[in-house]
Amino acid sequence: MRALTTKLREYCEGETDRAHRFRYGLLIFDLATLLFIVVSSFAPRQRVVEGIDVLIGVAVATDFLARLSICPRPWREFLRPTTWADLAAIVSFLAPIVGEGAGFLRILRTLRFLRTYQVLDRLRADSAFFRRNEEVIIAVVNLVVFIFVMTSIVYATQHRSNPNIGNYVDALYFTVTSLTTTGYGDVTLQGTGGRLISVVVMICGVTLFLRLAQVLFRPYKVRYPCPACGLQRHEPDAVHCKACGTILNIPDEGGD
C-alpha cells in the first residue's frame, strides 16, 4: 500500500517527464469530460450515453480517491469547493445506475466545470501563452461556467412545468438572451422562483459579460508586483513603477 501511495505521489507531484505526461493526461481527461457534459446536455438520454456516464464516474472517483490517499491531511481537501464539485460529479455520473432524473443530474454535473480552475492553475505554471493572456482566458472561463451552470438550473427547475422550456437548447437560449439583456420575451420563466433565477442571470451575467469586454479592450499590461508599493500591472517594457518610481525587473519570456 505504501509503495502504491509513493508511486501516486510521484505521478501527481513529481517533476519528471513521466509525471508531467501523467498530469497532462489528466488535464486532457478533464477537458474531454467537460466537452462530454456540454454535448450530452443536448442529446436525449440513451443507454450508450448512460454507459459513458458510468465510465466517467468511475474514472473521476478513482482520481478523487487517489488524490485523497496522497494528501497529508485529507480532511483539508473537503474545505475546497472543487472537492465538493468532484463528489457531486461522481454522484451525477453514477446516478443512472439508480435511475435518477436527468434534470437534477445536469445541475450536479455542471459543477464539474469548477475543475476548469484547477486546469488553469496547471496551465499558468507551464504555458507562457496562458500567462500572457491569463485575464482574457479567465474572463471567458468565468462566463462559460456561469452560462452552463445557470442553463442547467433553468432547465432542471422549469422543463416539467414551463412549456417554453422544452429542452436544454431552450434553457440555453433563455440564459444567453437574459445575460445580454436582449430579452426577446418569447421564452420566460414561470413563478417566483423563475423570476428570481432571471434576476440572478441578468445581474451576474451582465457583470461577467462586461468584465470580459473590459479585459478584451483594455491595453495589454503584464502582471508583476512592484516590490515597493505592490502595483500589479505595468507596461510590458516598463523600467520604473509608474506609481512609486521603483526600478522594476520584469522577466522577459522571449519568443516562447
Image: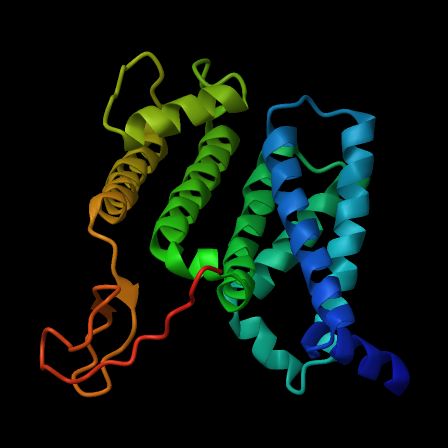
Q: Residue at x 61, y 43 (%)?
A: 34
Q: Is residue 132 left or right of residue 205?
A: right
Q: Residue at x 30, y 40 (%)?
A: 205
| Above or below for 45 versus 239 | above
- Front residue of 23/33: it is 23
**Residue 110 pos. (x, y %):** 55, 44
| Above or below for 54 versus 172 | below
Q: Is residue 215 left or right of residue 20?
A: left
**Residue 51 pos. (x, y %):** 82, 36
Q: Residue at x 38, y 29 (%)?
A: 175
| Above or below for 246 versus 153 | below
Q: Is residue 70 left or right of residue 1?
A: left
Query: Residue 4's quadrant in the figure?
Result: bottom right
**Residue 100 pos. (x, y %):** 70, 38
- Front residue of 179/247: it is 247
Q: Residue furthest front?
A: 255
Residue 72 shows in the view: yes
What colour scheme has been applied to the protein in the rendered image?
rainbow
Residue 160 shows in the view: no
What quarter of the picture does the N terminus occupy? Answer: bottom right
- Front residue of 112/15: it is 15
| Above or below for 54 versus 232 | above
**Residue 219 pos. (x, y %):** 20, 51
Query: Residue 107's quadrant in the figure?
Result: top right
| Number of marks present in the image shown | 0
Q: Residue at x 25, y 41 (%)?
A: 213
